[in-house]
Image: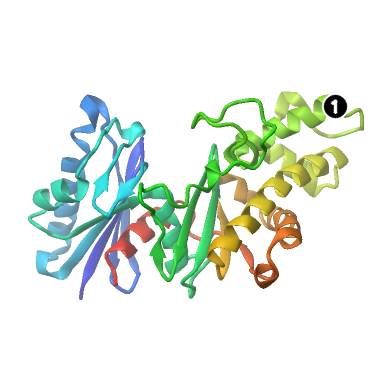
Amino acid sequence: MSYCFGIDIGGTTVKCGLFTTEGELLEKWEIKTRTEENGKAILPDVAETILKKMEEKGIAKSDVIGVGVGVPGPVVKEREVQVAVNLHWGRTMLADVLEELLGQIPVKVGNDANVAALGEMWKGGGEGTQNLIMATLGTGVGGGIIVDGKIVTGAHGAGGEIGHACVEPEETESCNCGNKGCLEQLASATGIVRIGKKIMAENTAETKLTLDDFSAKTIFDAYKEGDGVAKQIVDKFAGYLGTALAIFSCVVDPEVIVIGGGVSKAGQPLIDAVAGHYKEHAFISCKDTPIVLAKLDNDAGIYGAAKLVVA
């Protein structure tokens, strides 16, 4: 049997998965991400845990086709990390370093959001497709675009950074990236709260919402119960996201759009709200593209990382 490893390096933990090359997850585990001293221990720790798992399972190097790695930063040519702020890394030739530590087991690298999209295409909400857009709605808005089964990375590793598309030119506050009006400012968990506070300040209608307990979750809970103010908030948020997805679809014409991240816990009501705006603005050929919930949750990264090394 042939095996591969999927590694998802985050700022707090490194998620690890041992897979068959058919995509069966045999075992998953985590180790701590040691970011001190510019993260110099991270790759040695990853190599150590992989080699230890191989020894534990009696897996020979010749039976491992490769190790895929997802990292929170732009990646070039599936080998080089340009910068990973959360890991305290500057330019890092990750594949070269890890291959040496692993005794020349092949390594491929991808941006974590792109890799999560690849995982959802392989064994998640987009299983059976080759062309996919994924939007991950959490504290920020991550994204990944897959065309013909391959991650779109672009010339600078910034392909799929959908969270930093400008969707509100009149925005006066700056995004974390330095620009203004980014999708991330309006369609993330924090973005929904920003929209909500503005609408609450301008609205005198009766509502179940209170600023004492105000979050994406409480907004969607009230929305599901038919609250009128919550409906205004969700409709505004869904308008930004649905319209942005319609624009992206004009460029890559996906078979499916997958929505993941913490905000996606709102479920089908979220999908329905976004889909209405998407369909209104999408090009005629793309109007019926399904929008679905992600299925792999926190495992999307390890699945996608593994898929990097599986033909």
The answer to whether residue 221 shows anywhere in this view is no
- Residue at the spot x=70%, y=58% of the render? 278
Identify the residue at horizontal 69%, vertical 46% (top origin).
Answer: 240
Q: Which residue is mark 1?
A: 202
Q: Would you say 95 lies left or right of 304 here?
A: left
Q: Badge 1, how many Cα within 10 Å: few under 14, some, many 20+?
A: few
Counting from the top left corner in percent of width and height, residue 296 is at 48, 59
Q: Nearer the viewer, residue 10 or 195?
A: 195
Three-letter amino acid code at the position of disc 1: Glu
User: Residue 302 lies in what quarter of the image?
Assistant: bottom left
Q: Residue at x 88, y 29 (%)?
A: 203
Across and down, in percent, residue 223 comes to 79, 45
Residue 136 lies, in percent from the top left, at 53, 49
Position of 290 relative to 171 (above/below): below
Q: Nearer the viewer, residue 184 or 61?
A: 184
Q: Is residue 202 left or right of residue 21?
A: right
